Image (cartoon, rainbow, N blue to C red):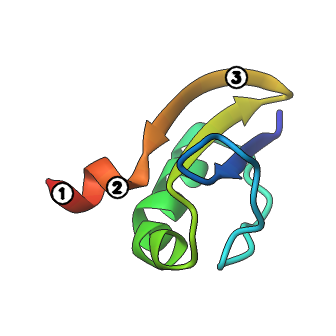
Amino acid sequence: MAWTWRFETADGTETDPAVEPEDFTTQGDAESWIGEYWRQLLEGGTEQVTLFEDGTEVYAMSLRAAAES
């Protein structure tokens, strides 16, 4: 299984991340990575991310909402 993130601007346009992600073999690894780098991603222009498992969307979330918490 491959877990990947798609990085998007506020309007949903795909963007290049400020921090290049690694390859993730588990959902937990992917989520741990986003938990570690979300601030840098947000500062680099990524507003929201979507997690995929083998090309199937699992969920999307706003990084801006995380910053406001």
Q: CA distance from mark 2 to mark 1?
A: 6 Å
Tell me the crowding category of disc 1: few under 14, some 14 to 19, or many 20 or more residues within 10 angstroms, Cα based: few
Q: Secondary structure at mark 2?
A: helix
Labels 2 & 1 near each other (Cβ < 8 A)? yes
Could you tell me residue 55's position as x and y percent? Answer: 85, 27
Q: Quadrant of the N terminus?
A: top right
Closer to us: 59 or 54: 59
Could you tell me residue 52's position as x and y percent? Answer: 72, 32
**9 left or right, relative to 34:** right
Q: In the image as oriented, which residue stretches furthest toward the left?
A: 69
**31 left or right, relative to 50:** left
Q: Report the disc number at residue 64.
A: 2
Residue type beneath disc 3: Glu
Residue receiving disc 1: 68
Could you tell me residue 35's position as x and y percent? Answer: 41, 61
Q: Residue at x 53, y 49 (%)?
A: 10
Q: Residue at x 47, y 69 (%)?
A: 42
Residue type beneath disc 2: Arg
Tell me the crowding category of disc 2: few under 14, some 14 to 19, or many 20 or more residues within 10 angstroms, Cα based: some
**21 left or right, relative to 27:** right
Q: Report the disc number at residue 57.
A: 3
